Image (cartoon, helix red, strand yellow):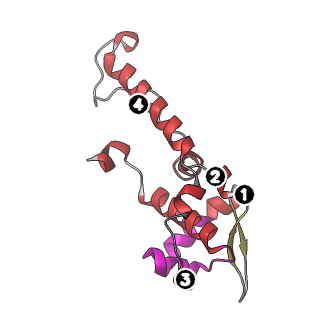
Amino acid sequence: MIQKLLNISERVNIAIHALAYIGAAGKNASVKKMAEDLQVSETYLAKVLQPLVKEGFIDSKRGAKGGFTLARKAEEITAYDLITVIEGPLPVNACLFAHPICNDKECRFRALTADVRTMMEQSLRKIRISDIMKNFKHKDDN
């Protein structure tokens, strides 16, 4: 039920977990190993990571010793940042119904969506990649 409420896409899910994985690795994380550990397609993971490289969240290095590293401190990267890079800004206050009929200014459902959007944004800004990194233990760690 909560998944439907938040409606976080698979791309965002992968982006958040990939950055936590990269941060926890503490070194170049290969897309092949990361895809295997995160149980996603290597091709799809590479596509998800492209905008994160472009926006300066991670660095990419080619070659045998290449891979991905965080370009920013994990404490500075929030779930909100990643959602907006992958999906764009959170929706503006909108009607919950497919065919709105009532007056925008007096609609209680629009007020509700505004409140929920504000709460979501505030909460997502508090979730940092450094928090999620704590859940990762790489297979080569002891």
Q: Mark 3 belongs to which amino acid?
A: Lys
The amino acid type of the residue labelled 1 equals Arg
The residue stretch that appears in magenta: 26-49
Please rate how many residues cluster around mark 4, counting C-alpha atoms within 10 Å: few if below 14, some from 14 to 19, many from 20. Answer: few
Q: Main secondary structure of the magenta part?
A: helix
Secondary element at tag 1: loop
Residue bearing mark 1: 72
Q: Which residue is mark 4?
A: 116
Magenta span contains residue 39: yes
* Mark toward the start of the polypeptide (1 vs 4): 1
> Which of the marked residues, 4 or 3, is nearer the chain's N terminus?
3
Spatial separation of the CA atoms under disc 4 and disc 2: 22 Å
Q: Which mark is residue 33?
A: 3
Residue 74, position as x, y percentages in the image: 65, 57
Give the side of residue 132 with respect to residue 50, left or right.
Answer: left
Residue contact between numbered discs 1 and 3, judged by CB atoms under 8 Å: no
x and y, in percent, of residue 36 in the image = 47, 81
First-in-chain label (1 vs 3): 3
Picture quarter with the C terminus: bottom right
Q: Secondary structure beneath disc 2? A: loop
For label 3, the SS is helix
The residue closer to the viewer here, 19 or 44, is 19
- Distance, label 1 to label 2, CA atoms, is 7 Å
Q: Which residue is mark 2?
A: 77
Callout 1: 10 Å neighbours few (<14), some, many (20+)?
few
